[in-house]
Amino acid sequence: MLVKNAKFFLDGKMTEKDILMEGGRIKSLGHFPGNGMDASGYLVLPGLIDAHVHLRDPGATQKEDFRSGTRAAIAGGITTVLDMPNNNPPTTTLARLEEKRAIASRKAVCDYGFHFGAGTNNFGEIERARPGSLKVYMGKTTGDLFLPDDRLVFLHFQNFPKKKPIVVHAEDQTIIDTEGRTPLAARAAAAKAAMLAEKAGRTICIAHASTAREMELAKRWKKSFVETCPHYLFLNEEKVKRLGNFSRVNPPVRSERERRKMWAALGMVDYVSTDHAPHLPEEKEKGAAGFPGLETSLALMLDAYNKRQIGMEWILSRMCENPARIFNIKGKGKIAPGFQADLVFVDLRKEWKVRAERMQGKCGWTPYEGMALKGKAEKVIFRGELVFEGDAITGKSGIGKEVMA
Ligand code: DOR
Ligand code: ZN
């Protein structure tokens, strides 16, 4: 398969070349004879990697499953998702990881990997399962995964292979219990996690940083990567107040002042994930925390790019290259010979309105409903095959494969 006249970034410079693909990989870049898919008018990005999603399968497939969730990913220009372990029951044993593997291999339409849950007493299971990544919860949230004791956090930091990533939900439970999910709860846990990581001699990832101060504290110890999510960059307390019960997310969306500080500190962000955490409207009404995000994340960034708020290099590094590097995902995150042929055709001039009813995900609502955006993923090639065009997903269930294994 051949893509003609593709505009894309090569070694940091915008270039225009044909992309020749073979066996699901990029074979070479250049100018080739013959017909192909014409990419004129689009910017071509490598498939995005979303390192933090909750696909709810098994356990809560009314909210999402591996098919609906990976279809939502593809529609958003994301070709690799890393699924979180806070299922019911949590992914804390080899048997449960294998069960998830079997489900994903039947249903996924994009590539996927799994974060394994750090439990109070599952060190043996971790050793047997040899997962590609571990998730540590320092505060309570959806599901039962939570380490009630810093010694357990430290033990996991010491125990888990140092070359593999550990992702930390950094909200301090003692502070949550006394004053709620404040910025202090987040920065206290982030600082503590970063210190313990350095003491254990390992790197960690601070998930969903919601304040600049927390990023700064985490970065003071040299071993921490920082993740943030679109809702901390594009929403504030004022805006989500209108959502009523639908506004809940852990950590919460912050004040406009905090949001602005996040923008001023974008250099400290290592990667952007969605923390796609879908719940049905009736579950939100009852207080469930979490936002869906797979189908809006890239578009929000493209809109910001169009407004000259961020550069395309920032988007490419934080949503493609860095997550591939940090999570040891081979052959992804770049358009280069030998890399997987996952390509997103972006129309930077497309003006559109976010509508939940047009989405692939199951939850049926979005915190960005009605927002006017400029820029959108219009086509997606996955492993060398066209799997998304306009609004139609043609990729078959089961074409996704496991990464980070
Ligand atoms: O808002 C959230 N929802 N925060 C989390 O940490 C978990 C997530 C979920 O799984 O619903
Ligand atoms: Zn999450």
Image (cartoon, rainbow, N blue to C red):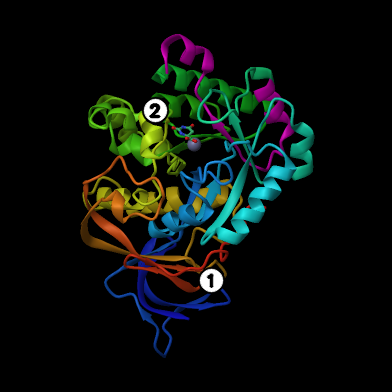
Q: Where is residue 47 in the image (x, y as percent from the top left)?
A: 45, 60
Residue extending furthest bottom? Answer: 34
Q: How far apart are marks 1 and 2 (CA)?
A: 50 Å
Q: Where is residue 6 in the image (x, y as percent from the top left)?
A: 36, 73
Q: Is residue 162 magenta?
A: yes
Tell me the quarter of the picture where residue 45 sits. Answer: bottom left
* Residue at 32% from the left image edge and 28% from the top image edge: 245
Task: State the SS at label 1.
Answer: loop
In the rendered image, which residue does mark 1 sit on? 337
Judged left or right of residue 224, residue 296 is left
**In the image, residue 318 above or below residue 40:** above
In the rendered image, which residue does mark 2 sit on? 286
Q: Earlier in the sequence, mark 1 or mark 2?
A: 2
What's drawn in magenta, residue-wise?
152-180
- In the rendered structure, are the residues bearing label 1 and label 2 in contact, judged by CB atoms less than 8 Å apart? no
Q: Is residue 174 magenta?
A: yes
Q: Where is residue 193 in the image (x, y as percent from the top left)?
A: 57, 24
